[in-house]
Image: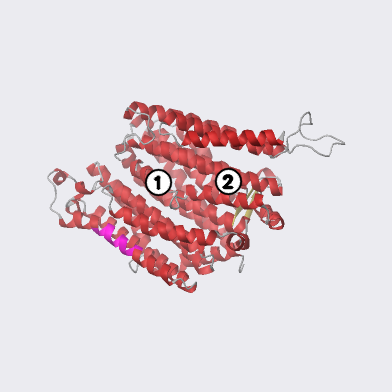
């Protein structure tokens, strides 16, 4: 059984997707998807457990041994990201039932859950695969299903948002394909471990440098690195609430993982950060992302759009950590990967609760809503605190590591800018809190009741996790450090 | 033949970029397909261009085209086809729902 854990991680949701399509009725489709997502989570936990004991795990598909067959390979970092994706999926689905029923026409709900499962398959596949081309295929599976999910949004502008995302995403995927093709041209292999060995003798060629550039730009488009983030705000704003929460917490994280995989495993840290100037470029873009996106977030009246811009800023923090290419920096990046999934997941779920009751998340419609929906707004407030990085929350842990990494590298200015961008986060979170808590309620919202418990519980589970992992950091920081050390080739 | 193919890929990519920068959905869809074609031809050509050679292996022949890029391109074509189909449907739905075919239809600028 343990031998097949790795492939089951992908096969379970993949096989379930067509089955889900055959089910009659939205309740059956939802219950089925929920069961599958919990099975996926259980599998992910077992996988992490096995990997922590064994170091890494490899699976040859169809018993065709690598480098000729497609190999799936999982180490600490990938098992950690698999766990993030699987647990966000498992938390979002209980929430999805009411939210999806409210936002999506009944005849499309079966299709919605099918696409959800396919998206889960794609995201998990990207993380577990050890084959560069297979990664591209899974990337396209997850992308195509997420375009579909976004286009199902109730607002008609969701169609335009999905269109823009599709065009940008496909350009990104095309870049990745060219990069993989160029690597194959130079080495004759697609297996990542094999690529890593064969690339270093030919590293000083124009083809390999071009491959590196294509991959970096393509993946940066997918992870919404400033200034390639333009698809993200619309996509997250107009997507159905459950989809915003799921994608905000997983899709960009998986893209960051792909970047890490290519930088550190395939090309190697010497090539990526010494032969190529990617460290300087990325850290500059990351700092600009932090400042510009946070400032833009400050002026958004749609709260989902505000959170979307805040996501761009948070991706900036993650990339900043990675661009330092030190153990502390990488640990900060990976730990923020996890923490940001928790806080953005929670905040977007709170948005879903508001949207269910108010039909809008425009700031004007939130006046005095805290009295009507105290639990939802309390969740938003606590999630916001984590976003800012107040002590005892996960956000604080991330920023602590990040500032430490910046200081270790003697980058005082960067450390100050990190703190400054946190102040911007204070401002945009406070703006919502002030309106929701201290303004008199509008007459329309007087009849509004608190969101149902099935939606509040998942939201609060994520909020609870924000505080749990903010206080007891031993698990996450140990995992992140171990993953960082594996990437840098230090330690076990 | 290599020179011809590379010029072809260059022209296709340039046209694709031009079309992608248009404001209406249809040229953008064409541009994206064209970009896909250019990349596919590029990958295909990377397996060596050769006429009248064996599909996989032949005794006595040292220089054979690599079959793997062809398999990769086949996969990429299928994915690209799915993307284009969805993109066309999406553009048509947007045209119906929003009454226009600009790529930023419905956004207040």
**Along the viewing direction, whichever of A109 and B31 lies nearer the viewer:** B31
Assess whether residue A423 is covered by the magenta stretch.
yes
- The reply to whether residue A339 is in sight is no
The CA distance from mark 2 to mark 1 is 22 Å
Q: Is residue B58 above or below residue A82?
A: above
| Mark 2 burial class by Cα count in 10 Å: few <14, some 14-19, many 20+ | many
Q: Secondary structure at mark 1?
A: helix
Q: Which mark is residue A232?
A: 1
The answer to whether residue A371 is left or right of residue A259 is left
- The reply to whether residue A309 is in sight is yes
Q: Residue beneath label 2, please?
A: A135
| Sequence-wise first label, 2 or 1 | 2
Q: Which residues are magenta?
A: A421-430
Assess whether residue A354 is covered by the magenta stretch.
no
Judging from the image, the colouring scheme is: secondary structure
Where's residue A478, x and y in %? 50, 67
Where's residue A185, x and y in %? 69, 45
Residue lying farthest to the right in this orientation: B60
| Residue at 42 percent of width and 31 percent of height | B25
Query: Could you tell me which chain the residue with mark 2 belongs to?
Result: A
Query: Could you tell me which chain the residue with mark 1 belongs to?
Result: A
Q: Which mark is residue A400?
A: none
């Amino acid at each position: 059984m343990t031998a097949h854990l790795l492939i089951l991680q992908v096969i379970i949701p993949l096989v379930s997707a067509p089955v889900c399509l055959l089910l009659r009725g939205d309740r059956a489709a939802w219950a089925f998807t929920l069961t599958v997502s919990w099975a996926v989570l259980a599998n992910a936990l077992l996988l992490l457990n096995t990997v922590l004991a064994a170091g890494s795990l490899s699976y040859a598909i169809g018993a065709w041994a690598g480098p000729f067959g497609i190999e799936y390979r999982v180490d600490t970092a990938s098992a950690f990201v698999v766990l993030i994706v699987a647990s966000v999926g498992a938390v979002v689905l209980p929430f999805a039932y009411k939210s999806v029923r409210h936002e999506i026409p009944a005849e499309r709900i079966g299709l919605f859950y099918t696409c959800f499962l396919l998206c889960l398959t794609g995201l998990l596949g990207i993380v577990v695969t050890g084959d560069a081309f297979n990664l591209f295929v899974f990337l396209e599976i997850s992308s195509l299903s997420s375009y579909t999910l976004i286009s199902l949004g109730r607002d008609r502008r969701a169609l335009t948002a999905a269109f823009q995302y599709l065009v940008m995403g496909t350009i990104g995927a095309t870049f990745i394909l060219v990069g993989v093709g160029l690597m194959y041209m130079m080495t004759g292999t697609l297996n990542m471990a094999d690529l890593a060995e064969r690339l270093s003798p030919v590293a000083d060629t124009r083809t390999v440098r071009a491959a590196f550039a294509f991959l970096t730009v393509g993946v940066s488009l997918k992870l919404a690195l400033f200034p390639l983030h333009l698809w993200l705000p619309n996509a997250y704003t107009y997507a159905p609430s459950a989809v915003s929460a799921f994608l905000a917490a997983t899709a960009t994280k998986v893209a960051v993982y792909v970047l890490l995989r290519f930088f550190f495993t395939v090309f190697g840290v010497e090539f990526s950060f010494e032969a190529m100037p990617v460290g300087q470029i990325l850290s500059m873009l990351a700092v600009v992302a932090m400042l510009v996106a946070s400032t833009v977030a400050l002026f958004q009246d749609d709260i989902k759009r505000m959170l979307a811009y805040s996501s761009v800023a948070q991706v900036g923090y993650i990339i900043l950590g990675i661009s330092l290419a030190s153990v502390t920096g990488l640990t900060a990046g990976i730990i923020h990967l996890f923490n940001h999934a928790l806080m953005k997941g929670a905040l977007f779920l709170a948005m879903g609760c508001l949207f269910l009751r108010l039909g809008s998340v425009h700031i004007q419609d939130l006046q005095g809503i805290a009295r009507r929906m105290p639990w939802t707004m309390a969740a938003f407030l606590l999630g916001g605190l984590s976003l800012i990085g107040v002590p005892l929350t996960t956000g604080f842990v991330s920023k602590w590591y990040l500032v430490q990494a910046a200081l270790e590298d003697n980058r005082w200015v960067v450390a100050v800018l990190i703190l400054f961008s946190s102040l911007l986060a204070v401002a945009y979170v406070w703006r919502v809190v002030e309106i929701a808590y201290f303004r008199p309620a509008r007459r329309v919202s007087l009849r509004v009741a608190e969101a149902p418990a099935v939606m509040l519980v998942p939201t609060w589970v994520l909020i609870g996790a924000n505080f749990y992992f903010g206080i007891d950091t031993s698990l996450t920081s140990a995992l992140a450090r171990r993953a960082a050390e594996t990437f840098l080739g230090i330690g076990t | 033949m290599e020179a011809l193919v590379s010029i072809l890929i260059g022209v296709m990519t340039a046209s694709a970029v031009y079309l992608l920068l248009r404001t209406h959905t249809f040229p953008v869809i064409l541009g994206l397909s064209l970009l896909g074609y250019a990349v596919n031809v590029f990958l295909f050509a990377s397996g060596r261009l050769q006429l009248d050679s064996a599909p996989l292996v032949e005794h006595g022949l040292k220089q054979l085209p690599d079959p793997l890029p062809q398999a990769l391109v086949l996969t990429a074509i299928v994915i690209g086809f799915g993307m284009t189909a969805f993109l066309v449907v999406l553009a048509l739905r947007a045209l119906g729902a929003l009454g226009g075919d600009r790529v930023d239809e419905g956004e207040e600028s």
